[in-house]
Amino acid sequence: MAKTMIITLGREYGSGGREVGKKLAQTLGIPFYDKELITRASEESGIQSHIFERADEKTSRGTMFSMGWSASLYPGNYMFYNNDMLTNDSLFAIQADVIRKVAAEGSCVIVGRCADYLLDGTPGLLKVFIHASMEYRRERIMRLYHVPAKDVDGVIKRTDRQRAKYYDFYTAQEWGAAKNFHISLDTSYFTPDGIVQLLADYARRQMG
């Protein structure tokens, strides 16, 4: 019987981590979750997806969202309404519940959102971090997202800082630190396709 393989991908902005994750899931024929987690969290909680998007991989205990309606308990027993207000911490708790559910359903690839931390100890878990040289990231972001050369370094630093704060805040661990992952790979050295092949070969062996 094939083993379950849960692959989590943390990534520096512009490193191509999402591309690696999506191609890896397609190569292995298993589900891919990135923004899909927001859709599912919205469907299961009844909270509009744009509210999750506004808080996606951002952290602020002071940020609250007016719901205009009230409810009592989320199925995960998180009391996340307080005078019709919803906090970022509550949104994180809902997404964490969804991440654990999709992992329990079978093999998959999950990008970001502290999935490596939330699923730590899960059988078949492979925790991956994707990074790249600054030069590679600059070129890729300017080419794909049409960010002007004069702005690209600032965009990279702000996005990485935001992801690091989110990860550090909810895990009390250092974002990108090698000790928190099973493997850390550089797309400017191996290339995204090379990394997909490397991880796919490993996963196939593990999955039988």
Image: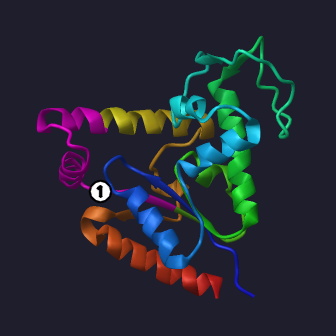
**Mark 1: secondary structure:** loop
Q: Is residue 60 magenta?
A: no
Q: Measuring from the top left, give residue 120's x and y in whole percent.
A: 67, 56
Q: Within the magenta stretch, is there residue 153?
A: yes
Q: Which residue is mark 1?
A: 132
- How many numbered marks, from 0 up? 1
| Up-down relation of residue 72 to residue 202 (above or below) | above
Of the 4 image quadrants, the one containing the C terminus is bottom right
Q: Quadrant of residue 92?
A: top right
- Spot the residue most to the left: 150
Q: Quadrant of residue 94?
A: top right
The x, y position of residue 129, in whole percent, is 45, 58
* 47 relative to 139 in the view: left or right: right
- Residue 150 position by quadrant: top left
Q: Residue at x 31, y 64 (%)?
A: 187
Please name the amino acid that badge 1 sits on: Ala
Residue 27 can be seen, yes or no: yes
Left or right of 143 on screen, residue 62 = right
Residue occupying image coordinates x 19% and y 46%? 142
> What range of the chain is rendered magenta?
128-156
